[in-house]
Image (tube, rainbow, N blue to C red):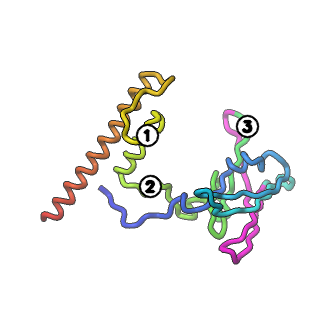
Amino acid sequence: MAYRYYKKSTTDDYLDLSIFKLKEYGYLDCVYKSGGIAWTRGGRETGSISVTSNFIDGKKYIELSYTHKKTEDLKYKVYLDKTYPNYGGVRYWFICPNCGRRVGVIYGGRIFICRKCRDLAYPTQNMQQHDRFLEKKFKIFKKLKVKGNEIFDKPKNMHWKTYLRLRDKANYYEGRCYLYLDTFITKMKNRINK
């Protein structure tokens, strides 16, 4: 059993700018577009940024403009790359301003850079094993529309085979969680008794 004595900052701790959001807002569909993007958490705005996409020049880029920590005005370009998936169409990527890696999401700070350069973990990477099992169980509960620890009934329009498979999977993860906690408690008792 591995223990972590530190926790890395996670992607949830930073403002993120996703290429998919830019596409959704129409920044990648036109030659030139200017506007803004705001982030909210709990109904309160946590940050905003001005974005200008420019596909006129030879190189495609977006220009980001914002104030960092209420003292420093920043304005810089983040270049874009594109690939052509097998299923057709075009997919755009950010070129990380720090390392040059092709990424789908960049994370804020002083400048927006990729997850690797910012040394960020995904939230689940900081979870203990039993928390991961519970997380999987509750994802299944969400599919089955179960609130709390109610007895699950088969949702309307779900096949019985699918329902039984999901129910068994949820029970499996719950059992694994309890088994993990039981072995953890036993090991701790043995350490104390030595």
Q: Residue at x 66, y 63 (%)?
A: 47
In the displayed image of the protein, which residue is found farthest to the left? 194
Above or below, 183 relative to 174: below
**Between residues 187 and 139, which one lies in front from this camera angle?**
139
Secondary structure category for the residue under label 1 = loop
**Magenta-drawn stretch, dominant element (helix, strand or loop):** strand
Is 49 positioned to the left or the right of 174 in the image?
Answer: right
Secondary structure category for the residue under label 2 = helix
- Locate residue 153, reporting x and y percent: 41, 28
Q: What is the number of the mark on residue 89?
A: 3
**Residue that numbered label 2 is attached to:** 125
Secondary structure category for the residue under label 3 = loop
In front of the other: label 2 or label 3?
2
Q: On the image, which quarter does residue 41 sit in? A: bottom right
- Locate residue 188, reporting x and y percent: 21, 60
Is 158 positioned to the left or the right of 17 in the image?
Answer: left
Q: Mark 2 or 3 closer to N-term?
A: 3
**Residue that numbered label 1 is attached to:** 147
Q: What is the number of the mark on residue 57?
A: none
Q: Residue at x 42, y 22 (%)?
A: 160
**Between residues 116 and 51, which one lies in front from this camera angle?**
51
In contact (CB < 8 Å): disc 1 and disc 3: no
Distance Cα–Cα, label 2 vs label 3: 33 Å
**Between residues 53 and 131, which one lies in front from this camera angle?**
131
Q: Name the quadrant of the C terminus.
A: bottom left
In front of the other: label 1 or label 2?
1
Q: Residue at x 54, y 62 (%)?
A: 13
Is 72 positioned to the left or the right of 165 in the image?
Answer: right
Distance Cα–Cα, label 1 vs label 2: 26 Å
Q: Amino acid at mark 1?
A: Lys
In the displayed image of the protein, which residue is found farthest to the right? 56
Q: Amino acid at mark 3?
A: Gly
